[in-house]
Image: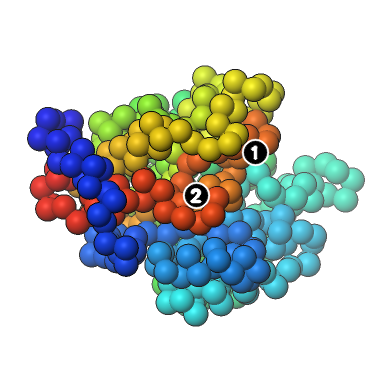
Amino acid sequence: MRNCSRFAVISLALGAAATAPAQMTLKDAFRGAFRVGAALNEAQFTGRDARAAALVAAQFNTISPENVLKWERVHPRPGAYDFDLPDRYVDFGEQNHMFIVGHTLVWHSQTPRWVFEDGQGHPVDRATLLERMHEHIRTVVGRYKGRIGGWDVVNEALNDDGTLRQSPWLKIIGEDYLVKAFEFAHEADPQAELYYNDYSIENDAKRNGVVDLIRKLQAAGVLVAAIGVQGHDKMDWPSVELEDAAITTFARLGVKVNISELDIDVLPRATAQTSADVAITANSQASLNPYPNGLPDAVQQALAQRYADLFGVFLKHRGEIGRVTFWGVADGDSWLNNWPVRGRTSYPLLFDRQDRPKPAFDAVIRLAGQPKGLSR
């Protein structure tokens, strides 16, 4: 993967970034390789943030919702659904001729407690929880049948060691809750692509857990279209070798790979973990927020190089990757401003807080324009 000639070409691409054609967009630069998208918040897809909405329409050809299709938002109470914002999200995608992703149907987080409990606060039985899952998926997926093209059916079902997470879904239903979730989603929209989505699955133990999980689903007759490699990356993790190995391993299962939630954290690590578990928190310290007034040029260039390295891997696997989706549009939108430390100033995306392209944007655009041999 890493060789002198490849890095020489990438360095030239970075050095020439300022000459990148102003009119080139991400969706055009990678057309024929894979879709490029972003996760949207409600201000963007409703047009309340008009500048960001215009940027999304210009740059991306696929979108994911940050929150509006998660259970706590779309189905907050028994029998009560709120489709106002999800409808507007789907309308935005259709108006801009985008591939629309639904995120997410079955997750241990951002799911109301009532889903797993009876009226006295005790855990429900297997049959009750299965019926609640079925009704939710049938209603939500069914509403957008033929409009949402792909669904993150199950999100983050594994621990970092590759074993199944002891979520209420597993404890109450058993291991086949994963099979049932995919079956219910396929029943609701037989044409939709169905995905398994998780973080840190580049690491060996969790990667092996994903392989075992997908093989079990396939043996049960489940149609898994793609594995979502979330891609909440650090400046030093995963290595390009680890990224390449993960994509290669998953593609051998006969499924596509989606880089589903890409961002690169340039800030000091608040914990020793590479996990992107939303439950992790850390105390605020000045040393963990070193760039409150802007990112130094040296760090901007390092981030650009890091993005170029990763996109080199993605381009190598252009036939195996379905899409690359950034988790957010611009730096000010990123969840990393508040995770795992609240109130930090983070710079993980290709556009700055004024929605302007950063050197990292120029780097990946230039990389896309190089001969295919660059990504080998």
Q: Position of residue 106 (x, y in %)?
A: 59, 52
User: Which quadrant would residue 365 be assigned to in this image?
Assistant: bottom left
> What amino acid type is highlighted by mark number 1?
Asn
Q: In front: 228, or 181?
A: 228
- Relative to 247, 122 lies left or right: right
Q: Amino acid at mark 2?
A: Asp
Residue on which the image places disc 1: 338
In the image, residue 156 above or below residue 51: above
Considering the numbered disc 2 on the image, is that residue within a helix, a strand or a loop? loop
Residue reaching furthest to the right: 120
Q: Quadrant of the C terminus?
A: top left
Is residue 177 visible in this depiction of the protein? no
Q: Nearer the viewer, mark 2 or mark 1?
A: 2
Tag 2 residue = 352
Residue at 54%, 54% (x, y): give it.
354
Residue 147 shown left or right of residue 323 in the figure: right
Residue nearest the observer in this picture, 238 or 116: 238
**124 horizontally vs 120: left or right:** left
x, y percentage for residue 226? 37, 54
x and y, in percent, of residue 336 in the image:
57, 39
**Earlier-in-chain disc, 2 versus 1:** 1
On screen, residue 300 above or below 358? above
The residues tagged by marks 2 and 1 sit, at their Cα atoms, a distance apart of 17 Å
Label 2 Cα crowd, 10 Å radius (few <14 / some 14-19 / many 20+)? many
Q: Position of residue 243 (x, y in %)?
A: 31, 36
Q: How are the colours assigned in the image?
A: rainbow
Q: Is residue 371 left or right of residue 306?
A: left
Mark 1 closeness class: few <14, some 14–19, many ≥20 residues within 10 Å: few
